[in-house]
């Protein structure tokens, strides 16, 4: 069973819905049918949502594969907690701040580290299974 993946994947899905909701609320308040309506703020809301949709799905797949293959429970929880933190701070700061910011930098870095770690663990598990 993928109970750990189900837990963190569900929280990440809620974060994605929150990001999508912010896009919808922007479009409704500004009466924008499609896209950002030429608004910098609209573009920021959309990019925050799109960025999460670019990284979250593959990371959850890697997470699930690691769990299926008997991944270390505490490591799964550590990666899951860090990934939730990363996606929240990235989504907040991408909208609120221009240029460099704590949330954008650390949100991106932690997300990438989670992906690299999970990919590495899965590759390592594959190599061990072939010996």
Image (cartoon, grey):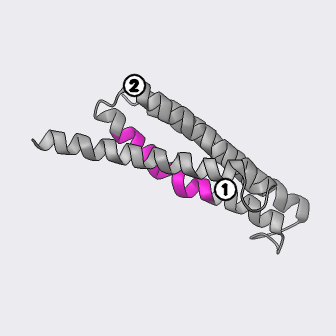
Q: Is residue 59 magenta?
A: yes
In the picture as drawn, the residue positioned furthest to the top comes out as: 74
Q: Which residue is located at x 24 percent, y 40 percent? A: 125
Q: Residues within 10 Å of mark 1 (few under 14, many from 20)?
A: many
What residue would you read off at disc 2? 73
Which image quarter: residue 128?
A: top left
Horizontally, is 13 left or right of 128 in the view?
A: right
Residue at 68 percent of width and 56 percent of height:
48
Q: Which stretch is magenta?
A: 51-65
Q: Is residue 130 magenta?
A: no
User: For residue 99, which numbered disc appears in the image?
Assistant: none
| Category of crowding for the residue at label 2, using alpha-carbon neighbours closer than 10 angstroms: few (below 14), some (14–19), many (at least 20) | few
Residue 51 percent across, percent down from the top left: 61, 58
Farthest-out residue, bottom: 38
24 sits left or right of 109 in the view: right
The picture places residue 76, in percent across and down from the top left corner, at 43, 31
Q: Which residue is mark 1?
A: 49
């Amino acid at each position: 069973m993928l109970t750990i993946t189900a837990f963190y994947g569900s929280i990440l899905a809620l974060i994605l819905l929150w990001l999508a909701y912010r896009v919808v609320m922007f479009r409704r308040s500004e009466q924008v049918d499609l896209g950002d309506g030429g608004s910098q703020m609209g573009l920021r809301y959309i990019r925050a949502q799109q960025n999460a949709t670019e990284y979250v799905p593959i990371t959850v797949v890697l997470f699930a594969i690691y769990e299926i293959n008997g991944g270390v429970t505490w490591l799964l929880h550590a990666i899951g907690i860090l990934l939730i933190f990363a996606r929240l701070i990235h989504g907040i700061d991408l909208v609120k701040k221009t240029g460099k910011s704590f949330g954008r930098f650390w949100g991106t870095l932690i997300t990438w580290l989670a992906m690299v770690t999970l990919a590495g663990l899965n590759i390592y598990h594959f190599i061990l299974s072939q010996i």
